[in-house]
Amino acid sequence: MPMSHPQPNSPSDVASSGAVHHQFSLQPSPPEFSPEERTVLLCLAHDSISSALQRSEISPDLSKFDPPTPHLAELRGVFTSLHLRGELRGCVGYVLPTSPVYRAVAETARAAAFDDNRFPPVTSDEAPHLEIELSILTPPEPIHPEAIEVGRHGLLVSQHGRRGLLLPQVPVERKWDRITFLEQTCRKAGLPIDAWRKGASILAFSAEVFGDKI
């Protein structure tokens, strides 16, 4: 089942830390996914939602995308965020690369629309107006805290069976520095904000983010 991590994109989950904030922007890098591949993935995300509504069941038809290009068949972590009239309407993702990227997009889009328990299921009236944002993740790898770069890395912090994840765009949107980013990821995991200093596992990943408006 997809792992839901709605809070990274939710404006209501972040308490003020009182930290000094610095201006950052997402660091540009050569795009991994071509415009054609991005179009395929975004269409697949929309089709996954609309087909579930039309059939009154959650089962996307992937046949017209089989077989995908070798690139879209790679195992990747994916997060799909839905927005409606500028407000978050759902966000669900796979942290680890356990599914081909094209299937992960279809499954997380469907789950964001119907399985994010913070929101009622998306309706047929809402579906045509949804704006979709995809974050395609690289595999998480261990990182030393001093090596974390705001605007480049997303974080996955875990300890004592608790795990919290924040996408790379989150500290940019919140104007967090590196320490605040670490603290807020610990908070997301339900850990003390200084757990990253006290033995918590810290993994980093990057993400290529694109969507209907990006």
Image (cartoon, grey):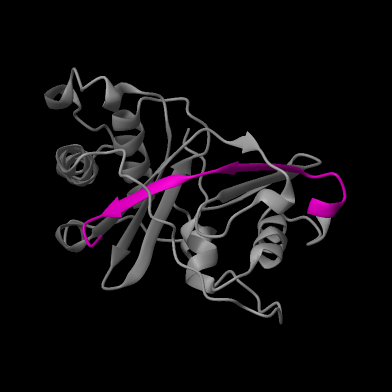
Residue 149 image position (x, y, % from top left): 59, 55
Residue pictured at 73% horizontal, 45% vertical: 144
- Does residue 195 lie above or below 103 as drawn? below
In the image as oriented, which residue stretches furthest toward the left?
64
Residue 158 image position (x, y, % from top left): 72, 43
Magenta stretch bounds: 196-214
Residue pictured at 24% horizontal, 60% vertical: 131
Q: Which residue is nearer to you in this view: 7 or 213?
A: 213
Res. 13 image quadrant: bottom right
Residue 159 image position (x, y, % from top left): 78, 43
Residue 117 relative to residue 211: left or right:
right
Residue 53 relative to residue 110: left or right:
left
Across the whole image, how many numbered discs are drawn on residues?
0
Residue pictured at 23% horizontal, 33% vertical: 60
Residue 162 relative to residue 94: left or right:
right
Residue 122 at least partly seen? yes
Residue 115 at least partly seen? no
Q: Which residue is nearer to you in this view: 165 or 155?
A: 155
Residue 28 relative to residue 163: left or right:
left
Residue pictured at 52% horizontal, 38% vertical: 95
Is 54 a magenta residue?
Answer: no
Quarter containing the C terminus: bottom left
Residue 155 image position (x, y, % from top left): 61, 49
Q: Which residue is nearer to you in this view: 48 or 175?
A: 175
Is 200 a magenta residue?
Answer: yes
